[in-house]
Amino acid sequence: MSTRPTPLIAGNWKMNGLAASLDELTALAEALTAEPVRARVAVCPPATLVERAARAAIGSAVEIGAQDCRAEQSGAFTGDVAAEMIADCGATLVILGHSERRSGYDETDSMVCAKVLAALRAGLEPIVCVGETLEERRAGRAVEVVRGQVTGSLPDALRGKAFSLAYEPVWAIGSGLTPSLAEIGEVHQAIRETLTARFGEVSSTVAILYGGSVKPGNAAEILSIEDVGGALVGGASLKAADFLGIIRSA
Ligand code: PGA
């Protein structure tokens, strides 16, 4: 019934990577040139590597993103990076509202929403992350929490714009644990319904990624779930060979 969005497989390097790590990016880019895939592929290195990564990816199928941005365009915000600065480095995407930022920096839905507006202002495509904690899941509140985060983190200005969402249960990130396929499907369906209620049928083109302990060994079954339109991959994106194993499953 709906147009399936092109899957997006995005790697989140988190605070990992020095200049030498770009060899992994180059290996990934070369492999995708030799063996094109159906999915969009993105790598989001730490801010220090965004510009070099963007240069290294020129002419390849790999898109480059950042992992966060400040909502303001410029000003006295020591240590922060504006969306415009990320775009100026050659990136085209930005991860926003990752749970490590929501929990570690007290980022609220409204702060994430302001960052999404900043990304749009700078011409970056946002990947907006949502996901429940273990306590919330155990209390039977996963769907309710995620629906609330989707509603609060997405500005109306996203209507008609390219963006994606990533459902990442906090307890599945870096833990080796994943929800059951049925649990992932349930939350993705709820996200799709929330998007459709908000933005209309056009939201069927928005990719909803799953993230949290995605590995080459579980990617195919996760990516085959209805409404799972890709993956946001942390640890397994650091090595080109592992990441390619996931990408080939899409
Ligand atoms: P993980 O991280 O794949 O290492 O669990 C996913 C993420 O935090 O985006």
Image (tube, rainbow, N blue to C red):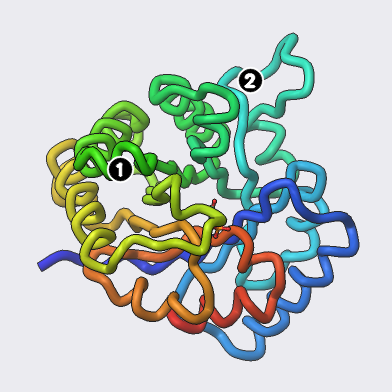
Q: CA distance from mark 2 to mark 1?
A: 23 Å
Q: In the figure, residue 159 lies in which quadrant?
A: top left
Above/below status of 138 relative to 18? above
Cβ of mark 1 under 8 Å from ligand 1: the answer is no
Residue that mark 2 sits on? 73
Residue that mark 1 sits on? 160
Q: State the residue in front, 54 or 110.
A: 110
Which residue does the image show at 47% across and 21% down from the upper left? Answer: 111
Which residue does the image show at 59% across and 89% down from the upper left? Answer: 35
Q: Is residue 111 visible?
A: yes
Estimate the x, y position of residue 250 in percent, counting from the top left: 42, 78
Q: Is residue 164 visible?
A: no
Estimate the x, y position of residue 2 in percent, counting from the top left: 16, 65
Horizontal side of residue 149 vs 195, given as left or right: right
Q: Residue furthest top?
A: 76
User: Residue 116 has which mark?
Assistant: none
The crowding category of the residue bearing disc 1, from other C-alpha atoms within 10 Å (few below 14, some 14 to 19, many at least 20), is few
Above/below status of 62 relative to 14? below
Which numbered disc, 2 or 1, marks the residue that appears first in the sequence? 2
Dot 2 falls on a residue whose secondary structure is loop
Estimate the x, y position of residue 93 in percent, counting from the top left: 56, 48
* Mark 2 residue type: Gln
Horizontal side of residue 21 vs 189, given as left or right: right
* Mark 1 residue type: Gly
Q: State the residue in front, 234 or 192.
A: 234
Horizontal side of residue 8 vs 240, given as left or right: left
